Amino acid sequence: MLIAFDSTQQALRMEMLLEYVEIEIDLCPTPKQVTAGCALSIRFPDEDELRVWEVIRLENVEIRGMFREIGEVFEELAAP
């Protein structure tokens, strides 16, 4: 799974929040297939999707979108 952002500030804030709740993440460059205003994205395990949505909601994190990688395509997911 991948979260893209429109600002570096929100990406770094989300990194801190997810590390605090002990979700394993990888801060990485935003893939060229995903249009976003920030060059940083966060990858995390699929099984943590609902916990990540909860952090986004509770902490009012502004994201460009959450995506599931299917081959070389990124499918945008709707919030639950």
Image: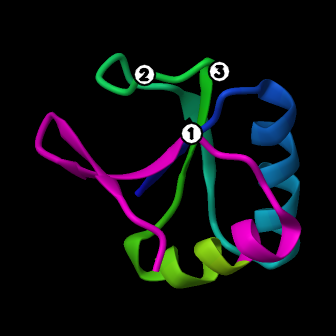
- The answer to whether the residue labelled 2 contacts the one labelled 1, judged by CB atoms less than 8 Å apart, is yes
> Viewed as shown, does residue 41 lie left or right of 77?
right
| Residue where numbered disc 1 is placed | 64
Local crowd at mark 1 within 10 Å, few (<14), some, or many (≥20)? some
Percent of width and height locating residue 45? 45, 68
- Disc 2 on helix, strand or loop? loop
Disc 3 residue type? Answer: Cys
Is 73 magenta? The answer is: yes
| Residue where numbered disc 2 is placed | 35
- Which image quadrant for residue 8? top right
Q: Quarter holding the N terminus?
A: bottom left
Is 72 magenta? The answer is: yes
- The answer to whether the residue labelled 1 contacts the one labelled 3, judged by CB atoms less than 8 Å apart, is yes
Compared to 36, does 55 lie above or below?
Answer: below
Compared to 31, does 19 lie above or below?
Answer: below
Q: Residue at x 50, y 46 (%)?
A: 65
Q: Which sits earlier in the primary sequence, circle 1 or circle 3?
A: 3
Span of residues in magenta? 55-80
Gap in angstroms between the C-alphas marked 3 and 2:
9 Å
